[in-house]
Amino acid sequence: MNDSLLHGVPPPAASHRIADYDHGISAIDAGYLRLGLAAIHLVVEGGQAVLVDTGTCASVASVMGALQAKGLAPEDVAYVCVTHIHLDHAGGAGELMHRLPRAQLVVHPRGARHMADPARLVASARAVYGEAEFARIYGDIRPVDAARILEAPDGLVLELNGRPLRFLDTPGHARHHYCIFDEASRSFFTGDTFGLSYREFDVDGREFVFPTTTPVQFDPAAAHASIDRIMRHDPEHAFLTHYSRIGHLPRHAQAMHELIDAHVDIARGLRDVSGRHAALARGIEELLLQRLAGHGCGLSPEEIRELMDLDVQLNAQGLAHWLDQPAAN
């Protein structure tokens, strides 16, 4: 997910939740805009820990509370991994690294310099929100000491007490995006590459997954290729930032391919219409409402729209930007 149209104020950190899975994996609710929207994943092996994504500065108290609840000291966190540098995934990295004295920040090579000097990220977001709204949502974006940043090239393997974590370059949502394959659980931490899946849309244990085509680097061909690359590892689960663990991955991979193509078809059909953004948003909303009805979702259309409105608007904005690029022609 990108940040270009986000709105609202995070709930207080005291409202955080923790969900525990097997293989020492937990999901900490980032408290970002609403509960159940963004997860920070914690992986623990033999008293050492890795965090995957950070939420915002407002999420840091929840992370520190979760570490304490697990009997972990700040010094026990070896790595903080940001799947990409959009602020709902990496906005809290600087503050979190300040609290975790032994951790290294693991970043895609294309994003590393923005973690050391977040001025461009901050300026872009402030231009969208204004100073006051930016401060409410994201707080103070602290830089990370460059000496503590570890770039993650494609194929990098880090070990957590002997537990291999493999980093794969997975563009499509953003060119500065990686995913992490955890061999112990045979699961991927996918950031936004494998789409979004909100627990409110689950039906009898079946999840609903849909793509995020947010600006400014959406690339449908790369998105398809990244999904295929993930599936070649035959993973059992994916841990999505939005929101946490899903199974049934072959079915979801097929749905993601279909929905990426459907988003592209909608965009191309509306390339030259007036009021393009509104038309794109209507088309995406209708597509997802139809898919959710077929999924058996029992929520009303109004409830679905409330949950999806942010994503629909962002997807429309990203498709509009993509349409204006030479690759879309």
Image (cartoon, rainbow, N blue to C red):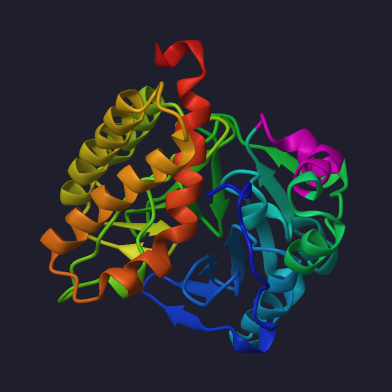
Query: Could you tell whether 240 is left or right of 77 in the image?
Result: left
Position of residue 13 relative to residue 103, above or below, is below
- Can you name the residue that lies furthest to the front here? 274
Determine the image quadrant of residue 255.
top left
Q: Which residues are magenta?
A: 109-125
Q: Nearer the viewer, residue 260 or 157?
A: 260
Q: Residue 121 appears at what percent x and percent y?
A: 77, 42
Q: Nearer the viewer, residue 87 or 71?
A: 87
Q: Residue 195 appears at what percent x and percent y?
A: 38, 49
Q: Nearer the viewer, residue 107 or 274?
A: 274
Say which residue appears at 15% left-offset and 63% top-offset. Answer: 293
Position of residue 46 relative to residue 82, above or below, is below
Say which residue appears at 58% left-offset and 47% top-offset. Answer: 2
Residue 166 visible at all: no
The reply to whether the magenta stretch includes residue 45 is no
Q: Dividing the image into 4 quarters, which one contains the C terminus?
A: top left
Q: Residue 39 appears at what percent x and percent y?
A: 52, 67
Q: Main secondary structure of the magenta part?
A: helix
Residue 130 visible at all: yes
Query: Could you tell whether 30 is left or right of 242 in the image?
Result: right
The count of marks equals 0
Q: Residue 1 appears at what percent x and percent y?
A: 52, 50
Say which residue appears at 26% left-offset and 43% top-offset. Answer: 256
Q: Nearer the viewer, residue 294 or 25?
A: 294
Say which residue appears at 44% left-offset and 13% top-offset. Answer: 327
The reply to whether the magenta stretch includes residue 122 is yes
